[in-house]
Image (spheres, grey):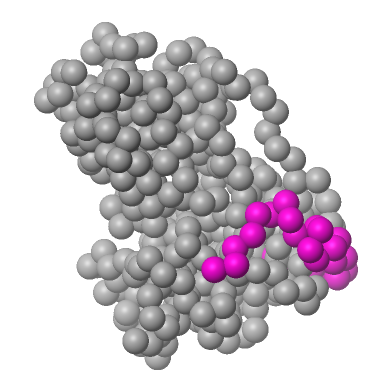
Amino acid sequence: MKATFGKNSRAFAAAVLSLGLVVGGTSYASAAAPGSCVVTGSAFSTDEAKGGVNFSTLSKSLGAVPKAPKGLKMGSLMKFLGNQYWIDLAAGQKTRAEKYGVTIDVQAASSESDQVGQLNSMETMVKKSYKALLVSPQSNTNLCPAVEKAEAKKLLVLNVNDGVLPGARQWVGPNQISNGVLAAEYFIKNLPAGSEVANIQGQVGAYAAIQRTKGFVDTAKKGGLNVVASVPGNWDVTTAANAAAAILKDHPNLKAFYANNDGMALGVATAVNNAGLKGKVMIIGTDGISDAYTAIKNGDITGTVDSYPNLTGQAAVDVALRLLGGQKVPRAVYTPVALITKANVNTPAPKLG
C-alpha cells in the first residue's frame, strides 16, 4: 500500500490532529524513500531501521564533516522548549552550528501538544532561506503538509529524535525501545521475581511513548515481573504525580515505576515521597536532564536512561552537513543511551569529538 499526504495535506493534517491518528508500524520503508511523508508498505520505524549506524562510526566510514558553505543557514523546529530535554538538544545544535560557522534558528511549539502551532511554525520556516530543516515533530504526521512543501523545494529535512515522519528520508536520535528495556532489566536484576511494577507513559500515540513502553513492558514481563499498571502521564509532571498516587493506592505492594521521561519520573517521586515510601519504591525515568541527575544524587529517583540530548543535537548538525556536502549517510543514525544510577551518576557524558 502506498500513501501520501499530498494535494489535500492541510485538510488531512487537520483530520489527523482532531482524530489523534498516528501512522505506525514495525517494519521499515525503502531506503530510497520518495518523500518523508510518503509510505510504501509500513511506516518507518527507527528502532528497526535497516542499515542504521552508530553516530561514532561516521567519521571512519565517511571521513571528516564537509566544510559548511559561507553563510549557511539551518532551521530547527523543537517539540517544546518548556521541557529541559529539548532545551538541551537545542543547545547542542547551537554549539555545533557555531563550531562550523553555521547560523541555526531554533523554533518550537507553545506546548508539548500544540501540533497545529508547530505546523504553523514550520510553514513559516519553509519560506525562509534555510538549506536544511532539523525537525522534531510532535506526532508522526502533524508536520507533513510543511515537510512536503520543503522537500518539493529540494530542502533537506532531517528528522531528529521523535516523532518519526512516516517515510523519513533521514533520521538521527536514540533507539527508543532500548530506553524501556534498560529500565526493565535493572528492575529484574534488583527485585524479586513476581514483584509489582508500573509504567507511566508519555503522550498517547507519540512514537517515543509507544516504543519506550513496549520495551519496558515486554522485557519486564519476560523477566518475571508483574506489570500491574501502564497509564498515560502525557509528559506532564502533575499528571504523572496524580497517576502514581492512584497506582500506589490501588497497589500498596508496588516496588517500582518506570516513567517515559524524567519530568514524569520527578512527578512520580513526589507521589512516592508523599506516601512515605522514599527509598522503598524504585523510580527510573528517561532523558538524562540535569534535574534527574540531582534527584538521583538526593535519592528521590533510582535512575534515568540518559539519551544525551545535547550530543544528539550536535550529531544532527553533523549529519545535516554531511548530507548537504553530498555524503551518503545511512538513513538512521543512532546516538547513545545509558542507564544512570548512583553508581555512575558522576561519569562524564560521551563526547562527539
Residues in magenta, as a range:
50-74
Quick check: can you spot residue 149?
no
Snapshot quadrant of residue 18: bottom left
Give the camera-side residue of 104 and 323: 323
Identify the residue at image location x=52%, y=65%: 49
Residue 41 vertical position relative to residue 205 in the rendered view, above or below: below
Magenta residue check for 29: no
In the picture, the quarter occupied by the C terminus is top right
Tell me what residue is drawn at x 57 percent, y 74 percent.
169
Q: Relative to 203, is 168 above or below?
A: below
287 w.r.t. 23: above or below: above
Res 6 visible: yes
Name of the residue lying farthest toward the top: 276
**75 or 188: nearer the eye?**
188
**x and y percentages locating residue 172 in the rendered image:** 60, 59
Where does residue 281 sit, x and y in percent of width and height?
A: 31, 18
Is 315 on the left or on the right of 211, as rendered?
right
Quadrant for residue 71, please give it. Answer: bottom right
